[in-house]
Image: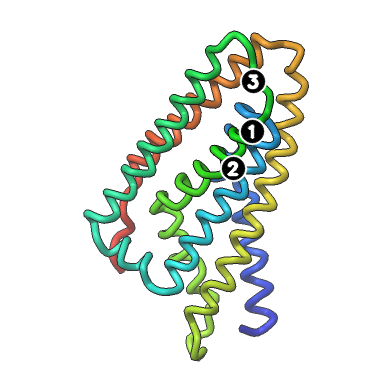
Amino acid sequence: MNCASFALFFAAALAIAAVPGPGILYVAARTLAGGRVAGMAATFGTALGGMIHVVAGGIGVSALLLASAQLFTAVKFAGAFYLIWIGLQSFRSASSPKERPESTPDARRAFRDGIFVEALNPKTAAFFLAFIPQFIDPSSTHPGAQFVLLGSISVMLNSLADVIVVAMASTVRSNLTQRPGLLRRLHQGSGLFMMGLGVSLTLARRPAAS
């Protein structure tokens, strides 16, 4: 890949990273519900989940996922139900009268959930397979390695955007610590929002075969 092509890819990936998507919205909801530590853990989790898609795309597994309507549907609903479940757990935990402090178990849970939420989102696989090949040199002897490299850069940019969102959301949450009632409603709203993301994922359609 020449410098001009890479610059075009980087600019496009940066622009895409700045656009709020399901990953950013999930990280924001997790931060509002659990604080900065949970938000950062969720960021690392979604990054790892994104890398799973990158590696899968590089070795051809993602193409098989999108080619099979049954497999696409199974992964889609698994991801959707998982999002709905963690959203429900977040909503229910917010009903406790005392807001729990940020803790290591919560961070571990946010990290684990971030991995599953991103890895079980077939729309992420569809995005990488539609976006990255446009910038791969067809004459290269290792197109899979190019795919993984460009995909890793895209994941890194997405993660940087997530970190900014975590900082903003944690600031909002910190300003509400003296208002426990409002903070509890914010926590509940974050849970409802994650459930909404899960419902929206059930509506995702498999890309038409070209």
Kindly identify the residue that appears in the image at 40 percent across and 31 percent down: 85
Q: Residue at x 38, y 44 (%)?
A: 79
Q: Earlier in the sequence, mark 1 or mark 2?
A: 1
Residue 13 spot, x, y in % from top left: 61, 62
Q: Amino acid at mark 3?
A: Arg
Q: Nearer the viewer, mark 3 or mark 1?
A: 3
Which x, y percent locates residue 54? 49, 65
Disc 3: CA contacts within 10 A as few (<14), some (14-19) or many (>=20): few
Question: Which residue is labeled 1 in the image?
Answer: 31
Whether residues under marks 1 and 2 lie with C-beta atoms below 8 angstroms apart, the answer is yes
**Mark 1 burial class by Cα count in 10 Å: few <14, some 14-19, many 20+:** many
- Disc 2 marks which residue? 42
> Which quadrant holds the N terminus?
bottom right
Q: What residue would you read off at disc 3?
A: 100
Could one spot residue 102 in this view of the protein?
yes
- N-term mark: 3 or 1: 1
- Badge 2 density bin: few <14, some 14–19, many ≥20, Cα 10 Å: many
Q: From mark 2 to mark 3, how far is it between C-alphas?
A: 18 Å
| Of 168 and 83, the residue lying toward us | 83
